[in-house]
Image (cartoon, rainbow, N blue to C red):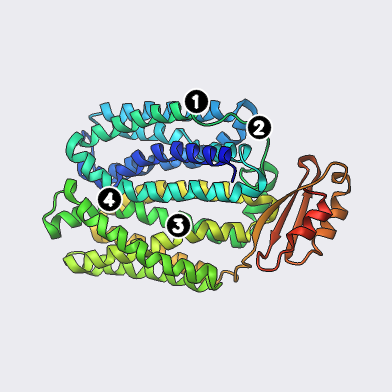
Amino acid sequence: MESKESHAALSLAAVFSVRLLGLFMIYPVFGAYARNLSGANPYLIGEALGIYGLSQGILQIPFGLLSDRVGRKVMIVFGLVLFGIGSAIAALSTSIGGVIVGRALQGGGAVGSVILALLADLTAEENRTKAMAMVGITIGGSFMIALVAGPIVANFVGISGIFWLMAALAVLGIAITQFVVPNPHRVRIHRDAEAVPALIGAVLRDKQLLRLDFGIFALHAMLTASFLVVPGLLRGTLDLPVNDQWMVYLPVLLLSVAFMLPAIIVAEKYRRMKGVFVSAVAVLVFSQALLYFGAGNLFVLLAALVVFFSAFNVMEASLPSLITKVAPPDAKGTAMGLYSSLQFLGIFAGGIVGGFAHQHWGDAGVFVLTGAIALLWLFAAASMAQPSYLTTRLLPIADGREGEAEGLAARLRQVPGVAEAVVIADEKLAYLKVDSRSFDAAMAQSLAGAT
């Protein structure tokens, strides 16, 4: 990438991370804190933990579409203002109801899709995948740092202090957006990076994509529900206060990454994606069985956490890759937008049903629920088609050639390594699905008149 593209990717990754750090920091410590709030019960604690996923999931695509009209930075700043106000409300609240309102407002700042659209505005087509990967790595890193940092920060400033930290991070995000992130020369629709309303119906009818959407929904529902009870289990088995539980999360996450990396290499390099994917879902089922039957035993509990987060990290890395492999070349952004919405709605569902199960059936009830979700996912995953191992490529079309869109698309399909080709005349772009091992890029560029 050119230096200006790297600058854009890094600065937008920073905006993403300052927002996600605070959101994830609350996970390992929220349950213990919320018990002391006025009106709290296990169900409402679950609702408070997951409610931001509801507003985030509903508003993710509308925020992106609105940014096409009013501007990317306007929507990012507006979303971060909402996030900051929600954080302040949660910090000042002494009741569970107030925290629920604050968390819902936090989720109202659904700027993820807008950030990706702005990144697409600021990068060339051939470098966009690299830039998106930089942001993706930042998201994964923020999650792991936050789980470890949350208990440490809470030890010094308390949970209300974490909410105030979120508000401060929102201000920092606004400053980065306004003064560090470059301004795009023009705002345009990018089918590879944002949702196109006309394509939503087709994406929702794609059974393979729906399986993957259910996967991310199930994964984050399980994660959210688990954090309603795991901190209490660690306190009971280890006699370890919540604020010191980072000493467990750190080695667990490091081990899980060590187990995840070989699995991803086998899946991608040796093209064993379905086998690795189905195996990881089966491992998630096994982790929930361990938690149900042996959560009171320290060694079983720690083993279950390592097993769970190993499979969790495999899924976090492989699901977006599978979406890009399965989605039609001109609908990648739409598929990713719906996928992201289902991820957040899974967080909401996990908080709601996890809180309900915890209130009525205790810790074991939560793991029965998460185990059932994992089993449903296993049945869905086992019937998925073998992925094609194709990647999306964008090819600029030279002036004058966009008028022969259908003919050009047909000729591009004859290029070695090209499986699908769609030419969008208005955008002067060809969207290709290619096998990178055999793709003749020079021939495709020659047909398109690209330089």
Q: How far apart are the alpha carbons under marks 4 and 2?
A: 42 Å
Which callout, 2 or 3, points to the residue nearer the camera? Answer: 2
Q: Residues within 10 Å of mark 1 (few under 14, many from 20)?
A: some
Q: Give the label on residue 187, or none.
A: 2
Q: Give the vertical position of 79 relative to 397 (above or below).
A: above
- Label located before the other in sequence (3 or 4): 4
Q: How far apart are the alpha carbons under marks 2 and 3?
A: 30 Å
- Label located before the other in sequence (4 or 2): 2
What x and y, as percent, mark residue 44?
29, 41
Q: Which residue is mark 1?
A: 178
Q: Residues within 10 Å of mark 3 (few under 14, many from 20)?
A: some
Quarter assignment of residue 102: top left
The reply to whether callout 4 and callout 2 are in contact (CB within 8 Å) is no
Q: Give the vertical position of 1 relative to 67 (above or below).
A: below
Rendered residue at 66%/42% (across/down): 190
Which callout, 3 or 4, points to the residue nearer the camera? Answer: 3
- Looking at the picture, which amino acid does disc 4 mark? Leu
- Label located before the other in sequence (2 or 3): 2
Which callout, 1 or 4, points to the residue nearer the camera? Answer: 1
The reply to whether callout 3 and callout 1 are in contact (CB within 8 Å) is no
Rendered residue at 47%/66% (across/down): 264
Instruction: Please indicate whether residue 343 sits to the left or right of residue 253 in the image.
Output: right
Which callout, 4 or 2, points to the residue nearer the camera? Answer: 2
Rendered residue at 79%/62% (across/down): 413
Q: Give the label on residue 316, or none.
A: 3
Is residue 61 visible in the rendered structure shown here?
A: no
Q: Give the vertical position of 150 relative to 384 (above or below).
A: above
Which callout, 3 or 1, points to the residue nearer the camera? Answer: 1
Q: Give the label on residue 228, or none.
A: 4
Secondary structure, mark 4, is loop
Is residue 374 visible in the rendered structure shown here?
A: yes
